[in-house]
Amino acid sequence: MTTDIRPLAGLRVVEMTHMIMGPSCGMFLGMLGAEIIKVEPPEGDKTRALTGMGRGFYPTFNRGKKSITLDLKSDAGKEALHRLLEGADIFVENFRDQSLAKMGFAPEVLKARYPRLIVSSLKGFLKGPYENRTAMDEVVQMMTGMAYMTGPTGRPLRIGSSANDIMGGLFGAFAVLAALLQREKDGQGHVLRTGLFENCLLLVAQHMVQFDIEGREAPPMPEREFSWPVYDIFETSEGRQMFIGAVTEGQWVTLCNILGLDVLRDDPALQTRMDQIEARDRTIPVVAKAVSGRSFSDLIEVFEDAGIPFSPIHRPAEMYDDPHVTRPGGLFTSTLPEGDTYRAPVMPFEIDDQPVVAGPLDIAAIGADTHAVLSAAGLNEAEIAAACGLESAA
């Protein structure tokens, strides 16, 4: 069961994007009830054909969208896009500024032509010295220090998902919601620009601020200075890895009691959190030895009952076996154009105790909705064929 709350129902989004940042913005808006019309070139979004680690890009971030194809190299294709924008509330794009301007769809042009249209541009950088640079998730992670903080010294490492792109898309959707509220007040559309670099900069802000306050840099996370007595990965008696945390004096005492470590619990030199942190070199090996004598299943049960932070070390594929993930509303099934199905999570929040997702979450075939959408916009058969780069409607 899902909550039938569609705050963006009745709003039309024309989306012209590829890869992850732009498509995720449209997906978030669609899951809140907006109609998403994805504009693809005649051969389809190239993201559809990615393999390897890119195989999940298109199916994950284009769920629930309509698909139309337009040949935007032609005047007919451009005119068809303008016809769609006449009835649209939001235009989402992640093209290079120069490419968009060359096609005649620069944000300032659209703002002048469609006064109530909200233009959401998802770019590598906000306006400034770098605004025309080519950016990708990995590029900005290297630029901002995110990769430096993730890998050990001398081995910068991007984080293990496209989290920066996804969060950039989320901020794009967040900006759209703000612009919609503002449009209710002033009746005007607005031009929005979301920067992937600036998004990543926000993600490393805590490390920047530490330096600005203290005048010293935080080391990379694998070599970090711990702020907690126990915050580590250990091995159980079966050799299975488990993360265990004890971040307060109370949790320290509880953990020592569970593991039978009276020698640490009662040590006069280990009675405050700072004492425990400063003694990690000698205490963590003791904790590790105690954990290695207990079974994984036993520790999970007692840690959960006692409120100790813990986690098994999972691979993403194992999430399909996790009882919390597979609970009702944890995963939603989508269908690919070929008929295959897959499961994926949706919005990470609930309203009135129910997950929120609007409409079907299937993936449309390339151009599956072209005729229906363009004919509803007033184009005849010949105009539709010309807009799609076809010689005839057939």
Image: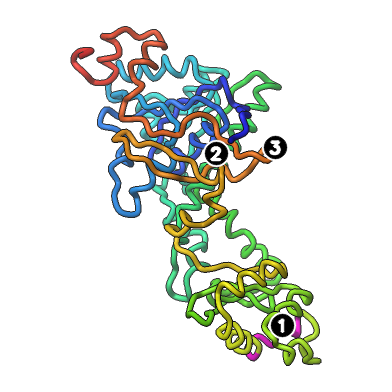
The residue to which callout 3 is attached is: 352
Question: Residue 84: image x %, image y %?
Answer: 43, 17
The residue to which callout 1 is attached is: 256
Lateral position of residue 146 relative to residue 383, left or right: right
Residue drawn 54% across the image and 52% down it:
325
Q: Quadrant of residue 289?
A: bottom right
Mark 1 crowd level (few <14, some 14–19, many ≥20, 10 Å Cα): some
Q: Which residues are magenta?
A: 274-282
Mark yes or no: residue 125 visible: no
Query: Which callout, 1 or 3, points at the residue further toward the start of the chain?
Result: 1
Residue drawn 77% across the image and 92% down it:
267
Residue 250 lies, with reference to residue 89, above or below; the image says below
Question: Residue 211: image x %, image y %?
Answer: 65, 68
Q: Secondary structure at mark 2?
A: helix
Q: Amino acid at mark 2?
A: Gly
Q: Amino acid at mark 3?
A: Asp
Question: Residue 300: image x %, image y %?
Answer: 61, 70
Q: How many marks?
A: 3
